Image (cartoon, rainbow, N blue to C red):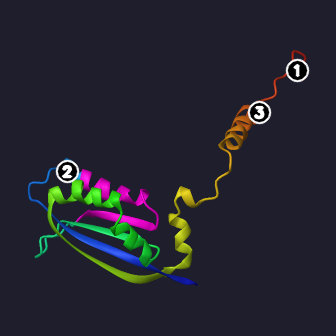
Amino acid sequence: MKRRKVVEHIILLRAKPNISDAEEKDMLDYLYTSQYQMRGILAVSLGRIEDPNSDNFTHAVFMRFQQKQDIAEFQSNAYYSKVVDEHVKPVSYGSVSVDFESEVEDDIIPLFRRGEVWPWPKSIDTVLSFFFFFSFFGNRKKKKNVAGF
């Protein structure tokens, strides 16, 4: 099996003790959906750390990037900076992050492709016409006339 290198990005967060459920959900939602705002992110997984730990980390974020350049662009992205400033920093008091390169099976990339990289038709009218035609004519049942034909 052919393998390819990817860059893994892990963030450990310390949420403030008085964080509400709504603030926690907001923070996690914004971090998760950042993958849809920029290219190069293959996967995001995040959530609350269940077991107490000596460093008081409360949440973990895992991101997988296609290449080193993608993580550099991600970290300097204006959208991500805004997410951190408006939805992470107000409800947390510290974080630690680490990046490392790893290898995965090469066929994993198509599992995480976003719509913008798929070959879309040049005209949406063609697609809509196609679906309209088959939804109208494809499902029509033949009616029998009075004679039963």
Q: Which residue lies at the image location 16% right of the left edge and 56% below the top edge?
A: 90
Q: Amino acid at mark 1?
A: Gly
- Is residue 135 shown left or right of residue 86? right
The stretch in magenta equals: 26-48
Location of residue 57 by image quarter: bottom left
- Is residue 79 shown left or right of residue 85? right
Residue 118: mark in rendering:
none
Question: Which numbered disc, 2 or 3, marks the residue closer to the eye?
Answer: 2
Callout 1: SS: loop
- Is residue 141 shown left or right of residue 75? right
- Distance of label 1 from label 3 (alpha carbons): 22 Å
- The answer to whether 12 is drawn above or below residue 3 in the figure is above
Residue at image mark 3: 137
Q: Amino acid at mark 3?
A: Phe
Q: Position of residue 118 (x, y in %)?
A: 60, 59
Classify 10 Å Cα crowding around label 2: few (below 14), some (14-19), many (20 and above). some
- Is residue 16 shown left or right of residue 34? left
* Quadrant of the drawing holding the C terminus: top right
- Could you say which is closer to the camera, residue 127 or residue 55? 127
Question: Which numbered disc, 1 or 3, marks the residue closer to the eye?
Answer: 3
Question: Which numbered disc, 1 or 2, marks the residue closer to the eye?
Answer: 2
- Distance of label 1 from label 2 (alpha carbons): 67 Å
Residue at image mark 2: 23
Is 116 colored magenta in this rendering? no
Residue 148: mark in rendering:
1
Q: Amino acid at mark 2?
A: Glu
Sequence-first tag of 2 and 3: 2
- The answer to whether 7 is drawn above or below residue 84 in the figure is below
- Distance of label 2 from label 3 (alpha carbons): 50 Å
Sequence-first tag of 1 and 2: 2
Q: Which residue lies at the image location 31% right of the left edge and 59% below the top edge?
A: 31
Callout 2: SS: helix
